[in-house]
Image (cartoon, rainbow, N blue to C red):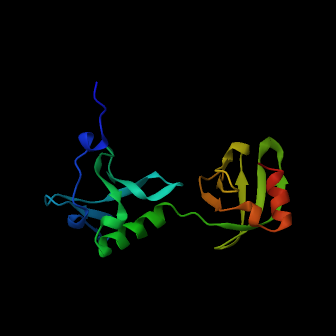
Amino acid sequence: MNPISIEDELEVLDCKKIEFRINLFEELEVCLPDGTFHSPVVPLRSFPVTDVNSYISIIKDDRKREEICLIEDIQHLTESSRRVLENALSKSYYKPVITRLLSIERRSGGISVWKVETNKGEITIDLRRRDSITDYDNGHLLIADIDGNRYEIPNYYKMDEKSVRLIMSSV
């Protein structure tokens, strides 16, 4: 039995001929090399934490949620399409970076309330349980709050002593 390569399963499109743009309703749309046009579409990262620029799936934003195409590497797009797609991805994957922990308060029902400082300002987030924190090694943490918002700590070992102590008691 011969192994199947990804190229056997997917049609590889010429990224230089794919055009992304934003319409009047602020929705992402795409025109493919064969001239087909899709609007609105949603970009989804296949590897949202480890490889943010590769294998971006473009999904039709409707009930069927069909995949339109897969962008192997956004660096292969034209500069204008790359900027539009990067902007759409940054909105979809909005993730403030936590720079300092001010306090953690434990409440009944397993909820903990974190007061933190982020690159977007000081906020309070509620975490339901410990598995709301994903440790990606080397101090890199991804945190999901009760409302589904995501926050990132690139390396908590490099934070101030109080923040490290609070994190160590929660991870």
Quadrant of the image containing the N terminus: top left
The residue closer to the viewer here, 61 or 75, is 75
Image point (65%, 62%), residue name:
154
Work out whether residue 63 can be spotted: yes
Drawn side of residue 156 relative to residue 21, left or right: right
- Residue 125, placed above or below residue 135: below
Q: Residue furthest left?
A: 34
Drawn side of residue 55 relative to residue 96, left or right: left
Q: How many marks?
A: 0
Drawn side of residue 157 relative to residue 87, left or right: right
Q: Residue furthest top?
A: 1
Image point (71%, 59%), residue name:
125
Residue 123 at x, y percent in the picture: 71, 67
Residue 155, located in which quarter of the rendered image?
Answer: bottom right
- Residue 103, placed above or below residue 171: below
Residue 101 at x, y percent in the picture: 78, 65
The residue closer to the viewer here, 8 or 162, is 8
Image point (41%, 66%), residue name:
88
The residue closer to the viewer here, 104 or 50, is 50
Drawn side of residue 156 relative to residue 166, left or right: left
- Residue 133, placed above or below residue 33: above
Image point (47%, 66%), residue name:
91
Residue 134 at x, y percent in the picture: 65, 48
Residue 24 at x, y percent in the picture: 30, 73
